[in-house]
Each structure stands twice: as C-alpha cells, then as structure tokens.
Image (spheres, rainbow, N blue to C red):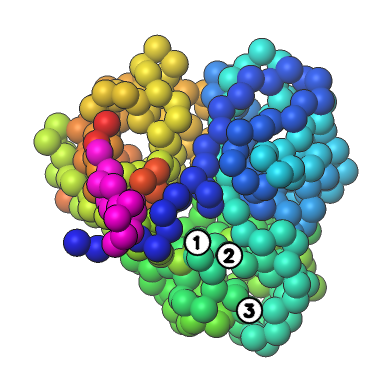
Amino acid sequence: MAYSSIVKPSDYFNTKLYTGTTNAQSITGVGFQPDMTWIKVRSASAYHVIQDAVRGATGTDTYSLITNAEAGDNTDAITSFDSDGFSLGTDANDRSNYSGQTHVAWNWKANGQGSSNTDGSINTTYTSVNTTAGFSISKYTGTGSNATVGHGLGVAPNMIIIKCTSHTSNWGIYHKSIGADKMLNLNTTAAEATNGGYFNNTDPTTTVFSLGDEGNDTNGSGKGYIAYCFAEKQGYSKFGSYTGNGNNDGTFVYTGFKPAFVMIKRTSNTDNWYMKDNKRSGTAALQDFGQMNPNQTQHPSANNNSAENKASAFATDILSNGFKLRGTDSGLNQSGESYIYMCFAEEPLVANSGTDGVPATAR
C-alpha cells in the first residue's frame, strides 16, 4: 500500500464556507495563511474571485469566467491574507462578501510573495513555491516569442493555469492528460484544441514550463501574467483523465485518497468546468459532496456565474480512494467522452507508514 508524506492535507488545501455581510470582516478557520484564494457566491449569481499573495491581496483580483485584466483598483474583495484565513472589504460588487448570501472559498498554501526565479529565459518577478504540496505561483512579463519560465517545484507540473493580468485574455490551461500541443480555456466551455503557441509543444520539465508565441493568453510581449503550477503529490493531489460510460453505475476514478476538491472538464466536447468539494454538505444546502453517497447536487462552474442548484444527473460518490460518477450528465459522464480532472485530498488513503497511519473512510 502506498503512503503519503503529507499527513494532514488540510494544512495545504482547505475549503471554507461563510456568509457575506457587505461589511468588512475576517474569515477564519482555514487552518493556514493562504497564498491563493478562490471565492464563489453559492446562493446567487456572481463572478468567481481569485486572488493571491504574489500579486498582493488588495486590488489584484481576477475572475475565472471572464477575460478582463485584473481589477487593480478594487479594494473591496480580499484585503489581506491572515494567519488563519483572510479579510474582506465591503465588496460593493457583490462577489466576495455579498450581504446575506452564502459563499465558498477554496484556499491553497504556497510560500508568501516569494522571490525571483531565474531558471528560465524569462526571470520571474516573484515565484512563491511550496514543494511539499507541489504548488507554485509565478508572476512574469511576456516576450512575444518562444520562452521558458521557472516554476521552482523541482518536479514537472501536471497542470498550469495562466492569466494575463494586464490585458484582456483567455485563461490558458496546460494539463498533462492532453499534452503541450493542446490547450483549454478556463473561462469557456470549448473542447481541447490543438495550439502549439500556448506552450510551444513542449511539456514542462523539473525546472521550467515553456511558452510559445501565441500572444495575449500566455506570452504577449510586455504583458503581465500570473501562472499557477500544480504537481502531483502522492496521497495529496492527482491530475488525470477518465472516460465516461453514460450510466448510473459510472466510471470510478482512483486518486489514492479521499477527495476534498475536484474540478472536472469534458475535453472531447464543449462543456463546463465543474467544481466539487467536501464542505458544502447536504442536499438542502444545494451541495455536491455530502454525508451520504451519492449526494445528488449541482456545483458552481469555473466558467460561469450561476448559483448552485440540485440536479440528480450530477450525483457523485466520494470514496476513501477516489470518486465514482453516479449521474449521467454529459459534463461528467457521457459514454465514450473524455474528461480531465484536478483533485486534492481530504485524507490520504493511509497517512504514513508509521504507527499513526490511519486508513481513510468513504462518506
């Protein structure tokens, strides 16, 4: 049996639920000081808000479903990253602190603002790295021609999310399961497409990821970018693919741990980026991963602003060693269709090889 070196995954990734007030408030209970926080209003339509410590909290939010540059003058979303969570401003735009509405915040730990990485042909302004959890955040300026950027992980990333912060652009996605000659966009439903300009037809190495001459989305000349790099860590994170079977006894996806979060995208056809987690429990609360298997609910999608709503076609079992599709929605489990996913752990299947290694249990 494989063991994980990360005994407590929630030290590096955790989901936090809270209710908005429109008044400044501090959100605690994350369990660490986050370096990337992704917020979505659950009970109403609203943009997703993504902020990170590399760019600094105040006034640097980006929205996963739209192409806008970062909101550099917005000081009413996350105002600081704190030792056990984050603080919110008054949120006049009703995105991160919507009065009376429920919110979900997904949090990852890197290593503060970081420092310049000079491994690639582009020197990053800052790269914040957590090698234990396989996560780094890099801020860089594009060149408009083939280039490389250091990610600092010491192993090759399995998934990369890039956004131009200074100009309008798509969110460029690299995923190991489709390769560097293909691309996806987080802000659209589009299927995978051949585009060597995004990542120069070159898979990431242990030190750098490659960029082509595509333009705005990953490497426009003189334009600013933020890149989130994720590397698979046994018992903590998994990045892979599966094929749907189109029935209620759906595909089982082995991860080697009990999932806390999963994002799924059909790559062979158009569809949403579906997001699930382990904290929004109970169908009455319109949640995905609850106390029962299956929990038949819909989830927010990274590419749209819709609120959550119940749908049996999205049913999913969360197990001690992976997840199993129980619904027939085309976005998750259509027969013969291909899907990619990113997944983070609630518990490893067994924490470690010592006397305190405890097997995870299914819901």
Q: Residue at x 72, y 59 (%)?
A: 112
Give the image quarter of residue 144: bottom right
Q: Amino acid at mark 3?
A: Val
Mark identifier at residue 130: 2
Q: Which of pointers 3 and 2 lies earlier in the amino acid sequence?
A: 2
Closest to the observer, 49 or 363 = 363
Between marks 1 and 3 in the image, the one whose residue lies nearer the viewer = 1
Is residue 57 visible from the viewing direction of this image? Answer: yes
Give the total number of marks visible in the rendering: 3
* Mark sitting on residue 133: 1
Circle 1 crowding by C-alpha within 10 Å: few under 14, some 14–19, many from 20: many
> In the rendered structure, which disc, 1 or 3, sits on the residue that comes first in sequence?
1
Quote the CA–CA distance across marks 1 and 3: 20 Å
Q: Secondary structure at mark 3?
A: strand
Question: What number is the disc on residue 149?
Answer: 3
- Between residue 177 and residue 189, name the one nearer to us: 177
Q: CA distance from mark 2 to mark 1?
A: 6 Å
Tell me what residue is drawn at x 25 percent, y 63 percent.
2
Whether 257 is among the magenta residues is no
Q: Which residues are magenta?
A: 348-361
Helix, strand or loop under label 2: strand
| Residue 235 placement (x, y as % from top left) | 35, 57
Q: Is residue 59 left or right of residue 286?
A: right
- The percent coordinates of residue 330 (x first, y second) are 27, 38
Residue 71 location, x and y as percent? 79, 45
The amino acid type of the residue labelled 2 equals: Asn
Mark yes or no: residue 195 visible.
no
| Amino acid at circle 1 | Ala
